[in-house]
Image (cartoon, rainbow, N blue to C red):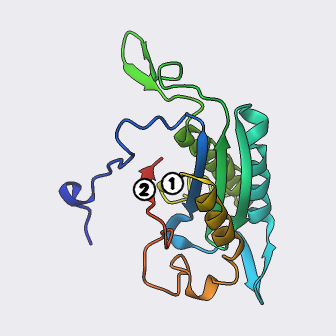
Amino acid sequence: MKYNPAIHHRHSIRLKGYDYSQTGAYFITVCTHNRECLFCFINDDEITTNEYGDIVRREWMKTPEMRANVELDEFIIMPNHVHGIIMINECRGVLQYAPTKTQTKHETKFQSPSNTIGAIIRGFKSAVTRQINEMRQTPGVPIWQCNYYEHIIRNDDELNRVREYIINNPINWQTDENNPVGASPCACPGYDSKEIYS
């Protein structure tokens, strides 16, 4: 289908007024471009990551080293997507991390807050993309979809359900909506996920 800006325009469906830098737990899914299986193999429900999957794991695990207010919870690398829970531990409101306007003679731009979920995922995706493309010698080739999915985890019961969902992902791979064998778009089945462009 030919691109039609009236139909295919990107828009954020973040919760209006929600501060994505505030204390809380967030269930994140990031999918590969065109759902290409890049990162691992699944045999008898066992995951074996390849060199690209190793890059994904390494960069995900670096997140708390780079951002002191972040902790990582359950995490899994699937052939064409990543599921993880990110905990933001310090309540730092949007005013402290609001976008700052910088202006030069020729342009005006806004800098993104550095401690929001969006900034965390952008940094992760960028680092993985750069390293995989250097390894493959494929500069400029997209690794990820241009978006990601997030779900705000509201309580301990929900946190435990999300953890279980992540842990059981390899077992359910054959029927997973992210499996390219199926026709469904990359999504988080069973959760009211928000598709965020980043």
Q: Cβ–Cβ below 8 Å for labels 1 and 2?
A: yes
Q: Label 2, on which residue?
A: 194
To which quarter of the image does residue 32 belong? bottom right
Secondary structure type for disc 1: strand
- Compare marks 1 and 2 and give the one earlier in the sequence: 1
When the figure is inspected, residue 184 is found, relative to residue 60, above or below; the finding is below
* Residue 167 percent coordinates (x, y): 72, 71
Query: Seen in the image, is 197 located left or right of residue 44?
Result: left
When the figure is inspected, residue 141 is found, relative to residue 109, above or below; the finding is below
Residue at horizontal 54%, vertical 51%?
Answer: 154
Query: Seen in the image, is 198 located left or right of residue 91?
Result: left
Q: Label 1, on which residue?
A: 150
Type of the residue with mark 2: Lys
Q: Is residue 10 visible?
A: yes
Residue at horizontal 56%, vertical 38%?
Answer: 119
Front one among 154 and 186: 154
* Residue 57 percent coordinates (x, y): 77, 57
Residue at horizontal 58%, vertical 60%?
Answer: 158
Query: Seen in the image, is 45 located left or right of residue 143?
Result: right
Looking at the rendered image, the quarter that the N terminus falls into is bottom left
When the figure is inspected, residue 3 is found, relative to residue 175, above or below; the finding is above
Front one among 107 and 7: 7
* Residue 8 percent coordinates (x, y): 27, 59
Type of the residue with mark 1: Glu
Q: Please tell me how crowded label 2 is: few (under 14), some (14-19), or many (20+) other residues with Cα within 10 Å.
A: some
Report the Cα–Cα distance between label 1 and label 2.
5 Å
